Structure formats: structure tokens, C-alpha cells
Amino acid sequence: MDQFTTFFRTRLFRHLRHPGTWIVIILTMIGARLFIPLPGEGYVTLSINNAYPVMSSGVMGLQLGIISALLLSPLAYIYLRAGASRTQPWQVTDVTPARRFALNLGQGLGDIAALWFILFWIGTAGLILSFFRLPLAEINPLHTMYTLFVVAGPALAMVAGVKTLFDARPWLRGAWGDVLFFILWMTGNVIAASLFQFDNAPHFIDVFGFAASSAVSSPEPVEFLAVGSSPASEKFITLDPIGGFANAEFLTSRLMWVLISVGLFLLAALLYRPRRQKQRKSRRISGVAISGLDKVGQLVMRPILPIFGLLSPVMRSNVSQIMRPRWMFAVLLVVSIAGFFLPFRKIIGPLLMLVLLLMIARFSSIWEARHLRQLRSSFASSLPRQVFMAYLSCALLVLICLLPSIVRSIISGSLPELTPDFAFMILGMPLLLITFGVLTRSAVLGRLVMLGIWYGYLNV
């Protein structure tokens, strides 16, 4: 018990002492103003059957909870990955006599407490807004906090559980973990939406709580639910989240997701693999196929790197860092050449964007690694110039990879149609990834944002 208490307090106080936590609190409190718009502001955060919800303290908490659970859960994941707990003293914890169960449980519950602390301040912002949106006699702080935490609390707890589970396995501590989280987040949304499509669907399938909470709060069957969309009509609907949340199945489902998140902490303790073994494993069983692709990537780099060296030695160094791992660059080369033969928008474009965003996101975090800014500030060129050179290196590399597809589009006459695609991949994608890497010193935010854009582009 003493070990658990120590790890819990250490992790929680680490979050509270970190300035990023308070920046997140301030930004989310400001954002709460946008989460609860007035009827005449031209958009809604929650619309049921194309109708505005009539405002009340419980409905305000419901709206804040749905936005926090559904849209802010990726930001919560980014906060845990790139915030106060990003740097771990694994050299000590991997050999400590403390049990891994106590460590994971203490640190995991510390993460949940930090996320719920941020959620509390979102609720506080909602209470402040209540004095401007509701008559004084109708303001009930308990209703706002209750509906907010019942909806969003389990969802944020699951984010902490998934993050802890990913930290247990070497392959999931980096980019592959971010990709898998994005897939799980999208899958959770799709499964929850099916709650309205099937009769007697269990509330348990909605991990984020937005569909189940809307269903139990609505006085009529939910046929259409919109979150964060433009209003389609001027109709109003009276919701009763306080009475609806008394539904035993709904409350049990929310409690079960909290317990599952705790179970993920314990599962992570069973599956934990020390970070040292990641390097040994990659050297020991790299595989014939990966080794061959590495050699192909190195051979291809030989004629490409001098091109950037003619422009600038800094650009050559940047591109050399981007082209890692070498086997991934070999895959990129194959996809790039295939662009001359295959359609861009349906096949080549999504494939190129996915591979390039993973490579550039990794570079953005390495280039802006911890303590590297102090070293780069001593260089002859200024920091803004170094940022620009990193962006230019990424943009030129993307341009070279797109050349076969550009040539094909010119020959086929589809260049005007594909020009926005090419422009975004060459100019927009590197700008987003490098900017987020510089601001957060982590690849997580840029990677998840670009994965969202990539998924949208994949479905165009």
C-alpha cells in the first residue's frame, strides 16, 4: 500500500507541478465557452433529431461531457504522451524492488486524477457560464458536475489505461502506439453510433458515453445525433440528463469502463517489457526482409542525398535524418514509383501521405529533442532559420516523392484536379508536423492531427 501511495502521489504532483497542465486547464476553460454556444451563434455542440437542447444545468454538463469525452479524448492522450509524464526514469523503475502492479496502478490512477482535475476546471468554466446562460434560480452546480463526470470521467480513464498499456510494450511506445490509438478511437466512435441503429443495444458498447447519455436523456427515440455541427433547424428539444442518468444499465456501463481502465493498468504490469530489451530485440531478430529493405534504402539514398548537399549541407543532414528507418524509405520509394502507374487519389496519395507523415513526425520530435534547443542556439544560423531549413528539407523530399505522380497527372490531364492534393502534401503537411514538433517537442500531436486528416482524405 505504501508503494502504491508513493507512486500515485509522485505522478499526480508531477502533473500538478508541470506548467503544461495549467496551460491545458486555461485553454480548456476558454474552450468551454465554445462548447456551449447560444442558439443564435450558428452552430451547435449537440443536436438531437435536428433540434437544439433546451439549456439547463444538467444539459450544460451533458454538452461539456460529450465534447470532453468524444473530441478531447485524443488531446488527453497527447497530454499524457507528451506532457509531464513523457520522460520516465525507466533506468530506475525497471530495477526497483517495488512491484510493477503497484507502480502501474499508482501511476495510472495518478494520470486519471490529473485528467479528472482538468475535467473539474472544465466544469467550473461551465458553472461560470451558467450565470450568463440561465436564470439564477435554475443554476445547480451539482447537476453540471454530475452529468459532466458521468459522461467524460470513464472515457478519460480509458485513455489513461490505454496509454499505460501502450507504454508496456516496445512497439507501442512510439508511432505505432499513436496509430493504434487513432484506430481504437475511430472504432469506438463507430461502435457507439450503432447504439441508435439496433434496438436493445447495450449501453456498454459506448466507451465515450456520448450516444448512451443522449439516448437516456432524450424524451423521444434518437434518430439523428450531431456533435459539433451546424444546426439544421430552429426546433428545440427538452432533455432530462439527471433523470435519464438514473438508468441502472447506463450507470453500470460507465462504472464498468472505469474498472476496465484499472484492469488495463494491471494488464500492462503483466505485459511490461523493459526498454533495454527493445534495442536487443531489434539487433537480435531484425529479420532478413527488414535487413534487405535497409540495404535497399541505403543504396537509394546515395544518389539522393548529394542533391540536397548541393543546396545546403544542413538540408542534407536533415534529409538523412528523415530517411529513417531505412527500410521505411525503401517502402516509400516503391510507392513513389508506383505513382506513375496507379491512380493517385484512391491509392498512391493515401499511401504516400501515411508513410511520409510517420517519417516527418518522427524527425520533428528528434530534431526538437530535449536539451537540443540550447545546443542549436549556439549555431551560427538563428533558430528560425534552422526551423525553416527543416521545413524546406521536408517539402523538397515530399516533392521528389511526388514527381512520378505529378508526371502521370500531367500526361493524363488531371493536374488541375490534383493540384490541391499535391500542394497540401508538399507545403501543408510538413508545415503542420514541423510546427507541432517545435511547439510541443513531441511527435504525438502532429502525428495524431495528420492521421485525422489522412483518414478524411482516405474517404474522399
Image: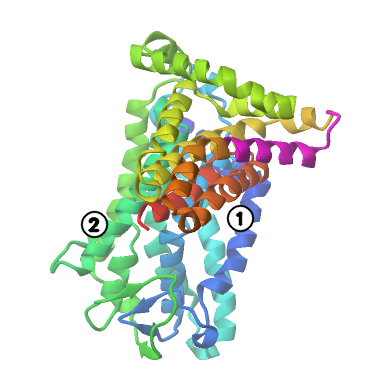
The percent coordinates of residue 89 (x first, y second) are 57, 26
- In reply to whether residue 392 is colored magenta, the answer given is yes
Prevailing SS of the magenta stretch = helix
Q: Which residue is mark 2?
A: 205
Q: Which residue is mark 1?
A: 24
Q: Residue at x 50, y 75 (%)?
A: 141
Amino acid at dot 2: Ile
Q: Residue at x 83, y 28 (%)?
A: 379
Q: Quadrant of the C terminus?
A: bottom left
Dot 2 falls on a residue whose secondary structure is: helix
In-image side of 459 versus 249 (left or right): right
The percent coordinates of residue 445 (x first, y second) are 54, 46
- In reply to whether residue 167 is colored magenta, the answer given is no
The percent coordinates of residue 161 (x first, y second) are 39, 42
Which region of the structure is painted magenta? 379-397
> Which of 147/280 is in front?
280
> Which of 59/46 is in front?
46
